[in-house]
Amino acid sequence: MSSDEIFIRNLAIDTIIGLLPHERSTLQPIELDITLSSDLRAAARSGKISDTVDYAAVALGLSDYVRTTQFELIETLAESIVQWLWAFSPMIDKINLELRKPKAVSIADTVGLKIIRMRPSLEFEDE
């Protein structure tokens, strides 16, 4: 397995996120740092965007997706983002995601979480 990575830093998206009544009716900013592991050697050889994970398409598509979601917990949003990324590209082997909610706690610059997910292996699934 290759250890190549494509990353997107400080992707800012406004969405409905939170438990409190005002959070359920007002868009709030979230910030994402995403690192996607994939074998990039084919793209390096071919020079074709179809042989890699298109970071611009990921950023735009994920922004559109997250804007349409409404979750109470950032944990649920993070898992939803992982599922979206798996569906977006079969080339992604591993996802490192940091999700921040900068306006959630007034006495902190930001709060959030980090998760790491490996693509589930299909070869061991029950038939």
Image (cartoon, rainbow, N blue to C red):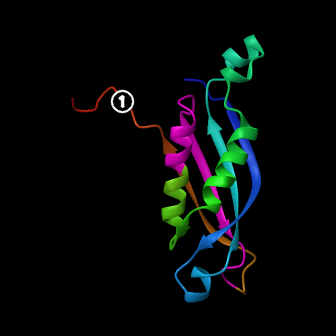
Dot 1 lies on which element?
loop
What amino acid is at disc 1? Leu
**Is 83 contained in the magenta span?**
yes
Residue position marked by numbered label 1 in the rendering? 122
Q: How many marks?
A: 1
Q: Is residue 80 left or right of residue 44?
A: left
Q: Residue at x 63, y 39 (%)?
A: 36
Q: Is residue 33 left or right of residue 78?
A: right
Whether residue 31 is situated above or below residue 7 in the rendered picture: below
Q: Position of residue 48 (x, y in %)?
A: 74, 18
State the image quarter where residue 121 is shown.
Answer: top left
State the image quarter where residue 88 is shown.
Answer: top right
Whether residue 122 is situated above or below residue 17 in the rendered picture: above
Q: Position of residue 122 (x, y in %)?
A: 36, 30
Farthest residue to the left: give it: 127
Where the C terminus falls, by quadrant? Answer: top left
Q: Nearer the viewer, residue 83 or 109?
A: 83
Q: Position of residue 44 (x, y in %)?
A: 75, 17
Give the residues drawn in magenta, as a range. 82-105
Whether residue 124 is situated above or below residue 17 in the rendered picture: above
Q: Residue at x 54, y 68 (%)?
A: 70
**Is 98 contained in the magenta span?**
yes
State the image quarter where residue 1 is shown.
Answer: top right
Whether residue 95 is situated above or below residue 41 in the rendered picture: below
Q: Position of residue 61 (x, y in %)?
A: 67, 46
Farthest residue to the top: give it: 45
Q: Residue at x 62, y 58 (%)?
A: 66
Around disc 1, counting alpha carbons within 10 Å, would you say few (fewer than 14), some (14 to 19), or many (20 or more)?
few
